[in-house]
Image: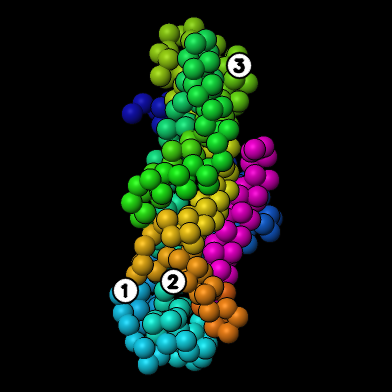
Amino acid sequence: MSAPALVAHAEERAARRTAWRRLWYRLRRNPSALAGSAIVLVVVALALLAPWVATHPQDAGNVVNFRARHLPPSAEHWFGTDQVGRDVFSRVVFGYRISLLLVVGVLGLSVPFGVVLGLLAGYLGGWVETLIMRVTDVFLAIPALVMALAITAALTPNLTNAMIALAVLWWTWHTRLVYGIVRSLRGEEYVEAARLLGARTAHVIFRELLPNCVSAISVKVTLDAGFVILIGAGLSFLGLGAQPPAPDLGTMVSTGSRYLPDMWWQSVFPGLAILFAILGFNLLGDGLRDLFDVEVA
């Protein structure tokens, strides 16, 4: 590598380090982002370390112990036990795995698809823009929960079909978000310069325009994670999500509600676990929105 290339590479690395330091400084001064990051890290850690964190890891499976059924919270069973004697705390910890798996599955399928469509519609314009955005408008007119209920009811209720049902509609918000950003950027000088230099359409879209959408997409994905957990829990509450004996939080709330108010712990603690995870993602998303200074619908 030549001397000028080495100097340019060193300057690029220094600029990148400076940008990360500036970002970390702003993050430390944002209480919402810090609190959300801490909560999300706790949720992820509990999910990953569930076999070691859970006090009764065997209770996450198809286990029955009628001698220990309906026990209130105690030193042995921190969140009490359910109707068949399983430890509620252990099932809540393993339930985070299902919730996060749902988030990864739904957003992993819908976000790339929606982002690509938004990039194409915003940059190419013409009939491509009209077709993509009219289809997007049609899907946006359908409430996500209603469509998810219809799809999961038509198919076999399970976690995979719940992912598919949510992903079918979730791409629309990312398409609309990216489309608006790209439309405002496609006339910028650096885009015109890339075109004049002979850059291909794919290069302009993915190397010039996409990086300018990353901060807004990151904020949107973080906020969406909480909504996915909430809607997934709603589907499970109605019996259309993960099926027993899987330790799903929504299913636990539904089952525990039959024993209210006497055995309150069976539904209250899983409900609080859902609230805790959603609060973490929402605080983190709000903090990132302030950090990147972006507007996300």
Nearest to the eye among marks 1 and 2: give it.
Answer: 1
Residue 295 horizontal side relative to residue 93, left or right: right
> Residue 246's quadrant in the figure?
bottom left
Residue 290, horizontal then vertical, whole percent: 68, 45
Q: Nearer the viewer, residue 284 or 77?
A: 77
Nearest to the eye among marks 1 and 3: give it.
Answer: 1
* Callouts 1 and 3 close, C-beta under 8 Å: no
Amino acid at the residue labelled 2: Val
Q: Identify the secondary structure beneath mark 3.
A: loop
Q: Residues within 10 Å of mark 3 (few under 14, many from 20)?
A: few
- Mark 3 and mark 2: Cα distance apart in space: 49 Å
Amino acid at the residue labelled 1: Gly
Residue at x 61% of width, y 60% of height: 279
Residue topped by disc 2: 93
Q: Identify the secondary structure beneath mark 1.
A: loop
Q: Which label number is shown at residue 61? A: 1
Which range is magenta?
Answer: 269-297
Residue topped by disc 3: 188
Q: Confirm whether the magenta stretch covers residue 228.
A: no
Residue at x 57% of width, y 74% of height: 268
Q: Residues within 10 Å of mark 2 (few under 14, many from 20)?
A: many
Residue 267, horizontal then vertical, whole percent: 53, 74
Work out whether mark 1 precedes mark 2 in sequence or the reverse, and give the earlier one. 1
Q: Identify the secondary structure beneath mark 2.
A: helix
Q: How is the image coloured?
A: rainbow
Residue 207, horizontal then vertical, whole percent: 45, 25
Residue at x 39% of width, y 82% of height: 84
